[in-house]
Image (tube, helix red, strand yellow):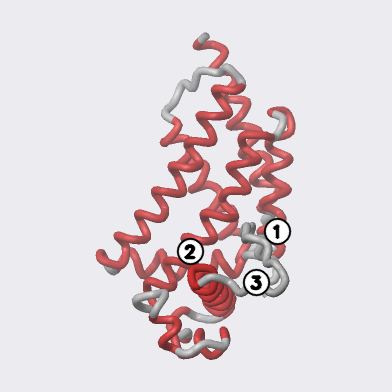
Amino acid sequence: MSSAAGYKGQFFRRPKLAGVSPTRAESKAATRERILSVAHELFTTQRVVDVSLDHVAQAAGYTKGAVYSNFSSKTDLLFSVLERYLTDVGGDYQQLTVTAPLDELGTVIGARAGESEDGALGYFRLLTAVWVEAVHDEEFAQRFVAIRRAHRRRVADAIRARAADAEVELSCDADDLAAGLVAMSIAAMLESLIDPEVSSEDVHRVMVDLVTAGVLATGQAAT
């Protein structure tokens, strides 16, 4: 999920009625969404250092002032792109975790990862670049850490919800389990970036099947 073409954002907007002008808030939201979409494409297809707010404004069809009215800096825009992706696409995985049949969970999650592998590797190239910068810049890292923690909390909440639905008592902390799953997922995607023999779909399927089996076995033993 070029990477923007495969990006499956799910944004719900109020339907427009013929002859009804959008409100100021709706216009501002549409402008922000357009800027984010363009920035996502630029950041995931070019080096971060080569993308400027001038480039984003020109590609989006706005003035630089319009960009600054929505984002305080290039860094703010960059993190907003990352946060948008994790909230939206990450939400797909969380929804599948809660709703997919347990005996098909690995297959379903793997298939979703395969979609990402086919079209969204630009995002993981971007993620790698941001991670490197965060390692060397403590201030830069603070917001990145906040975004990552929020993502892991949502994954942990999905795990807790699924365990409760299956009436399984977790034998480990859901937050630790979420952190491990997220880390393994990222590692699989990064491996597939450089090695075509690595299938993130297969890796995710095996990983989720093993974790699910382990959780069910230890959970049943605990009850």
Is residue 100 visible from the viewing direction of this image? yes
Residue occupied by mark 2: 82
Judging depth in this view, the residue of 179 and 147 nearest the camera is 147
Whole-angstrom CA distance, mark 3 to mark 1, is 53 Å
Q: Which residue is drawn at the image coordinates 56% and 51% (left, top)?
A: 90
Whole-angstrom CA distance, mark 3 to mark 2, is 33 Å
Judging depth in this view, the residue of 28 and 221 nearest the camera is 28
The amino acid on which the numbered mark 3 sits, given as a three-letter code, is Val
The amino acid on which the numbered mark 2 sits, given as a three-letter code, is Leu
Mark 3 residue crowding within 10 angstroms, few (<14) / some (14–19) / many (20+): few
Dot 3 or dot 2: first in sequence order is 3
Residue 196: % across, % down: 69, 63
Whole-angstrom CA distance, mark 2 to mark 1, is 27 Å
Is residue 44 visible from the viewing direction of this image? no
Secondary-structure class at tag 2: helix
Judging depth in this view, the residue of 14 and 207 nearest the camera is 14
Answer left or right for 74 relative to 119: left
Q: Is residue 11 above or below residue 136?
A: above
Mark 1 residue crowding within 10 angstroms, few (<14) / some (14–19) / many (20+): few
Secondary-structure class at tag 1: loop
Q: Quadrant of the N terminus?
A: bottom right
Q: In this rendering, which labeled residue sits more in front, label 2 or label 1? A: 2
Q: Which residue is drawn at the image coordinates 73% and 48% (left, top)?
A: 111
Answer left or right for 41 relative to 105: left
Residue occupied by mark 3: 20
Dot 3 or dot 1: first in sequence order is 3
Residue 153 falls in image quadrant: top left
Answer left or right for 100 relative to 39: right
Residue 197: % across, % down: 70, 58
Q: Which residue is drawn at the image coordinates 47% and 90% (left, top)?
A: 63
Image mark for residue 197: 1
Q: Is residue 179 above or below residue 24?
A: above
